[in-house]
Image: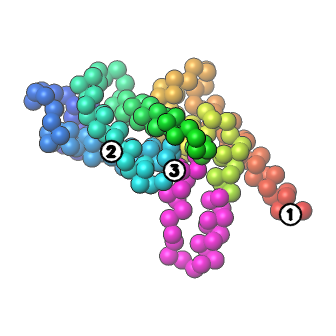
């Protein structure tokens, strides 16, 4: 089954009648995407537990809507759209809390190290600095494209389709802009720390 594409798994599942959670093709499909969905949810969530809950909700919603997948795009793009919409609705529902989109995507990197305490503290400082640059230097779309590409490892064309970007260069333009802005933030930081 590992050689089959996502779309082939869906096709084989459909050929057996109505999909059930115990369908081996459906199980394989969701096994492939479970971790990535959790990482996507982590971008929108305040903590890992909440992200895991969100990812379970997304996968359940995707299963219920699986029969509506028409194959006009890759399954992963369709799944990401469901995930994004679900997470955005969740963020809107807790709108009284400050928006920290971007910080959560990096927070899983801050897992405790087993190295010396000095190294752990330096790593935390670097992560805090990176979060700050991303949060303060990038516009919302730049931040989303940057995190989807570098954290979620999504190809630029998939990001362009998923976000419905209509500019000529698609997601690539936002990556170029984000890199330029983050480079400028790093340059300013170096000048301040040398002063």
Question: Can you give x and y, in whole percent of width and height, for residue 71 in the image?
Answer: 30, 23
The part of the image, by quadrant, that contains residue 125 is bottom right
- The residue at which mark 1 appears reads as 194
Question: Can you give x and y, in whole percent of width and height, for residue 149 in the image?
Answer: 53, 41
Q: Earlier in the sequence, mark 1 or mark 3?
A: 3
Q: Residue furthest left?
A: 16
Label count reads 3
Q: Are marks 3 and 2 in contact (CB under 8 Å)?
A: no
- The residue at which mark 2 appears reads as 56
10 Å neighbourhood of mark 3: few (<14), some, or many (≥20)? many
Is 28 on the left-hand or right-hand side of 150? left
Q: Name the residue at 64% across, 77% down.
A: 118
The part of the image, by quadrant, that contains residue 9 is top left
Magenta-drawn stretch, dominant element (helix, strand or loop):
helix
- Look at the image and tell me in which quarter the C terminus lies: bottom right
Q: Disc number at residue 46?
A: 3
Range of magenta residues: 102-128
**Can you tell which of label 1 and label 3 is closer to the viewer?**
3
Question: Can you give x and y, in whole percent of width and height, for residue 152 in the image?
Answer: 47, 44
Q: Are marks 1 and 3 in contact (CB under 8 Å)?
A: no
Q: Earlier in the sequence, mark 2 or mark 1?
A: 2
Q: Name the residue at 27% across, 47% down.
A: 31
Secondary element at tag 1: helix
On screen, residue 42 above or below 110: above
Is 126 on the left-hand or right-hand side of 7? right
Secondary element at tag 3: loop
- Look at the image and tell me in which quarter the N terminus lies: top left
Q: Are marks 2 and 1 in contact (CB under 8 Å)?
A: no
Q: Is residue 8 visible?
A: no
């Amino acid at each position: 089954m590992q050689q089959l594409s996502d779309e082939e798994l869906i096709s084989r599942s459909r050929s057996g009648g109505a999909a059930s959670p115990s369908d081996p093709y459906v199980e394989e499909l969701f096994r492939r995407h479970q971790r990535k969905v959790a990482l996507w949810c982590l971008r929108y969530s305040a903590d890992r537990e909440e992200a895991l809950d969100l990812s379970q909700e997304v996968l359940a919603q995707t299963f219920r809507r699986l029969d509506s997948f028409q194959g006009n795009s890759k399954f992963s793009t369709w799944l990401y759209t469901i995930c994004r919409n679900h997470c955005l609705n969740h963020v809107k529902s807790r709108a009284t809390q400050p928006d920290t989109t971007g910080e959560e995507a990096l927070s899983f990197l801050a897992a405790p190290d087993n190295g010396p305490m000095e190294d752990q503290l330096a790593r935390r400082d670097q992560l805090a600095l990176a979060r700050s640059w991303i949060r303060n230097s990038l516009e919302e779309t730049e931040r989303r494209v940057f995190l989807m590409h570098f954290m979620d490892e999504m190809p630029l064309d998939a990001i362009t389709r998923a976000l419905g970007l209509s500019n000529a260069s698609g997601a690539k333009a936002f990556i170029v802009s984000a890199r330029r802005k983050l480079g400028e933030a790093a340059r300013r930081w170096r000048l301040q720390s040398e002063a």
